[in-house]
Image (cartoon, coloured by chain):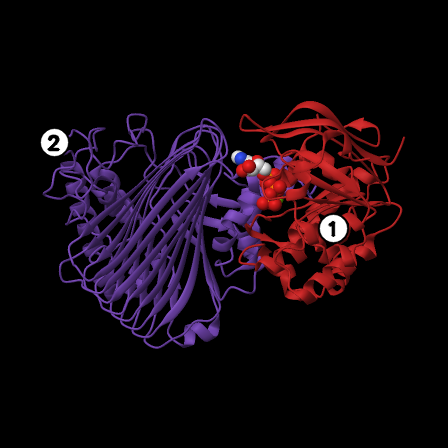
């Protein structure tokens, strides 16, 4: 607990129906929210924990996940200045005037909000989800876990068995999987805090908006929910960052992100996760793209002990263009398991995915990229590339593209690479006097640089660069 | 200690195959030595071996720089001590800008040069001034500073940027591996003038080429011809003219006694 802020008393550990009732009461929520939470809880209880035999979970065993000891929410802040309590790496946000707005979620609740007056006047709404439920109930009710991240359909299960006659996974179907349902239902029961962004029709927001989620409460489970709605022709950039304080106890995070793009709108969304090394992080993210929309969707994964991510890019309108970008850098014993889904439901749409990762020490990454093109989705272009650099002998990466192409007029490519730094690149830099550690650092930073350059706030780019440098370890200032 | 690079009875293997079969050569500061020879004769193997590429294994002989064996030194140490290789095929390093790379390299070199405590890192404005001045000398557009190193550069641009690196890092022993290949006529003159501007009593040059033309600009003191991993003949600048006229075939008929041994 940082001393600049004060919260009220502790909440009991463990997930239960009673805990939901207490949470809902403490937030003085309307009945429809409470009902949705209880519906999600019901489904959670009915859904088994994914077994190690589940095709989508076999790379991420859950037996070490201890849900009994985590606390489902923390009471809101009742005093103090959260901006002063932010960890050093996020401190830049407090006085960054190049962002059009800033939200801070501290533990389970919104603790700070700022939005440029000009944007307020044009009808932009940027606040935490609890405030949105209170002040804009119709909007939230329409979109919150009803269209994008839902728990009524299992988008990953398929009639085809995961295991073919050969006894090996043959692609084109995950069989009877639990998918992301276990953790999205839990999220639906306990979501708290989070980011709500609404951009009205035709409003173009130039300055990027920024949202931070930070937690330091011992044993806390965070359930940050982002609900982003762009009306027709709207345009905005949003950077979300996630961080937590290092402690002994295992911590738990189950987030959801919903990106809803109405016709002709354009969104750049950056999701940057740098939790402490005791966090087990689950995230389900869905983008819903109506016609003529454009989306840049970048995820950065640097922190957590374990990250299990499901990202579904659902193209439900023609003329959509989605750029899915990702970077990750694992060290120590970090374990990242990411699923992306280029989901071409109708045609005349393009998705272009590039995920780049570096792994050192004993870090592990699994990347599974599914491209599905429906029979009706003619004229779809889908590209996928996953590049992994292994910086140590004991790091490991699995990269598995999966194609379910049911239309015939389609352009589709995929490629994956896993390997060490190119020794000829290393030699070239060393032949200029740069020592091996520094040369490796330059190459890895260069590897990530084109993705970093997409992030529209310089202090955030600097923060990411120093996180990567710190991971490279041998860094010495060359200035 | 003599300011020279001294190669003695050098035998080098690549992936188990012997490529250099006993080379002797001395390059003193202030001298320019040209090395010519047919494709595959081992010129780049010599260049890479001098720079310390781990794939090139010295199985016999010695390489001394200023009297010290370089064989145990890693490539970065050789470079910091002033040995520079302009690559025949420079590598692209995507994501690393020319400016960032050059500044990192210059700081590494300066630290080494000033290793008696005088190590002073170059400030950013000072560095920019130096880099822009050298770019102008090589008629390189300043926008190259912000481009990713060799990424998407044309063949000629890569060669110019190699010489830019040489001009910024200020080495004492430069090995130029076919820097002239791929340069257009104007670029050849500009790059040669760049190299000539750096020439002086503090710089030795080993210039690998197939063509007489660059030697019209950068006048060699000696010319050596490498055939099948050995020097077939050594001589003065006139040897290059002879080769231009007669090709390499006649060398194969020279008796071993007539062969040069470098210097
Ligand atoms: N890394 C390597 N792996 C395998 N073989 C190699 C390698 N480097 C050089 N060789 C072989 O060694 C021999 C000499 O090659 P080298 O590149 O030194 O020739 P060169 O004289 O520079 O030729 P060129 O004039 O074409 O540049 C060739 O037969 C080449 O195939
Ligand atoms: Mg060669």
Which of the numbered marks, if any, corresponds to residue B71? none
Residues tagged 2 and 1 counted as in contact (Cβ below 8 A): no
Name the residue tied to disc 2.
A165
Indicate the secondary structure of the residue bearing disc 1. Answer: helix
Q: Position of residue A282 (x, y in %)?
A: 32, 41
Residue at point 34%, 33% (across, down): A70
Q: Position of residue A337 (x, y in %)?
A: 34, 38
Name the residue tied to disc 1.
B242
Residue A10 visible (yes or no): yes
Residue B194 visible (yes or no): no
- The number of callouts visible is 2
Q: Label 2 lies in what chain?
A: A
Q: Colour of chain A?
A: purple
Is B54 on the left or on the right of A151, as rendered? right
Q: Are marks 2 and 1 on the same chain?
A: no
Indicate the secondary structure of the residue bearing disc 2. Answer: loop
Residue at point 68%, 31% (across, down): B74
Q: Of residues A183 and A348, which is closer to you in this image?
A: A348
Q: Of residues A70 and A462, which is closer to you in this image?
A: A462
Residue at point 44%, 29% (across, down): A333
Q: Label 1 lies in what chain?
A: B
Alpha carbons under labels 2 and 1: distance apart: 72 Å
Q: Position of residue A64 (x, y in %)?
A: 32, 26
Circle 2 residues within 10 Å: few <14, some 14–19, many ≥20: few
Which chain comes out red in the rendered image? B
């Amino acid at each position: 607990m940082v001393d600049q802020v004060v919260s009220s008393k502790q909440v009991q550990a463990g997930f239960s129906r009673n805990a939901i009732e207490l949470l809902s009461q403490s937030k003085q929520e309307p009945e429809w929210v409470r009902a949705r939470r209880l519906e999600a809880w019901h489904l959670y209880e009915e859904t088994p924990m994914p077994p190690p035999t589940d095709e989508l979970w076999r790379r991420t065993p859950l037996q070490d996940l201890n849900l009994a000891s985590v606390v489902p929410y923390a009471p809101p802040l009742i005093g103090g200045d959260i901006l002063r309590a932010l960890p050093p790496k996020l401190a830049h946000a407090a006085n960054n005037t190049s962002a059009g707005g800033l939200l801070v979620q501290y533990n389970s609740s919104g603790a700070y909000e700022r939005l440029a007056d000009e944007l307020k006047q044009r009808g932009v709404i940027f606040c935490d989800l609890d405030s949105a439920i209170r002040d804009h109930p119709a909007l939230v009710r329409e979109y919150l876990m009803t269209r994008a991240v839902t728990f009524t359909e299992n988008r990953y299960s398929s009639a085809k068995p995961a295991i073919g006659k050969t006894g090996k996974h043959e692609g084109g179907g995950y069989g009877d999987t639990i998918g992301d349902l276990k953790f999205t239902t839990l999220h639906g029961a306990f979501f708290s805090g989070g980011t709500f962004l609404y951009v009205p029709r035709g409003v173009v927001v130039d300055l990027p908006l920024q949202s931070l989620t930070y937690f330091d409460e011992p044993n806390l489970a965070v359930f940050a929910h982002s609900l982003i709605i762009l009306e027709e022709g709207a345009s905005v950039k949003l950077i979300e960052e996630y961080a937590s304080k290092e402690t002994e106890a295992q911590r738990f995070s189950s987030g959801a992100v919903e990106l809803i793009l109405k016709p002709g709108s354009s969104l750049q969304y950056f999701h940057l996760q740098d939790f402490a090394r005791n966090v087990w992080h689950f995230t389900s993210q869905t983008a819903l793209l109506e016609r003529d929309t454009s989306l840049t969707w970048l995820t950065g994964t640097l922190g957590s002990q374990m990250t299990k991510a499901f990202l579904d890019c659902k193209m439900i309108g023609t003329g959509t263009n989605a750029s899915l970008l990702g970077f990750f850098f694992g060290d120590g014993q970090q374990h990242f398991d990411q699923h992306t889904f280029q989901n071409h439901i109708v045609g005349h749409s393009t998705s272009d995915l590039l995920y780049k990762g570096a792994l050192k020490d004993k870090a592990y990454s699994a990347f599974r990229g599914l491209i599905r093109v429906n029979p009706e989705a003619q004229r779809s272009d889908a590209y996928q590339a996953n590049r992994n650099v292994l910086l140590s002998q004991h790091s490991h990466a699995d990269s598995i593209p999966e194609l379910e192409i049911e239309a015939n007029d389609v352009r589709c490519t995929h490629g994956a690479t896993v390997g060490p730094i190119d020794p000829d690149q290393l030699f070239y830099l060393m032949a200029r006097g740069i020592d091996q550690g520094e040369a490796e650092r330059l190459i890895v930073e260069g590897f990530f640089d084109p993705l970093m350059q997409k992030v529209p706030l310089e202090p955030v780019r600097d923060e990411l660069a120093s996180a990567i440098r710190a991971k490279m370890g041998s860094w010495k200032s060359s200035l | 200690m003599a300011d020279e690079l001294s190669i003695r009875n050098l035998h080098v293997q690549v992936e188990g195959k012997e490529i250099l079969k006993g080379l002797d050569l001395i390059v003193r500061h202030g001298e320019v030595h040209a090395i010519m020879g047919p494709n595959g004769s081992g010129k780049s193997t010599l260049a890479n071996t001098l720079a310390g590429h781990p794939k090139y294994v010295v199985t016999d002989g010695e390489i001394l720089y200023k009297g010290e064996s370089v064989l145990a030194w890693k490539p970065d140490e050789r470079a910091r001590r002033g040995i520079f290789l302009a690559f025949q095929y420079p590598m692209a390093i995507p994501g690393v800008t020319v400016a960032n790379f050059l500044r990192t390299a210059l700081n590494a070199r300066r630290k080494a040069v000033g290793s008696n405590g005088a190590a002073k890192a170059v400030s950013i404005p000072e560095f920019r001034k130096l880099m822009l001045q050298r770019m102008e000398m090589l008629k390189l557009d300043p926008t190259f500073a912000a481009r990713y190193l060799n990424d998407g550069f044309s063949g000629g641009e890569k060669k110019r940027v190699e010489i830019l690196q040489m001009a910024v890092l200020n080495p004492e022993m430069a090995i130029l591996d076919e820097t002239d290949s791929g340069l257009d006529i104007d670029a050849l003159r500009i790059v040669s003038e760049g190299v000539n501007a750096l020439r002086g009593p503090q710089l030795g040059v080993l210039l690998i080429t197939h063509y007489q033309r660059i030697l019209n600009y950068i006048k060699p003191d000696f010319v050596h011809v490498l055939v099948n991993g050995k020097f077939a003949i050594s001589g003065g600048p006139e040897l290059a003219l002879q080769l231009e006229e007669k090709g390499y075939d006649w060398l194969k008929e020279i008796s071993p006694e007539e062969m040069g041994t470098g210097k």
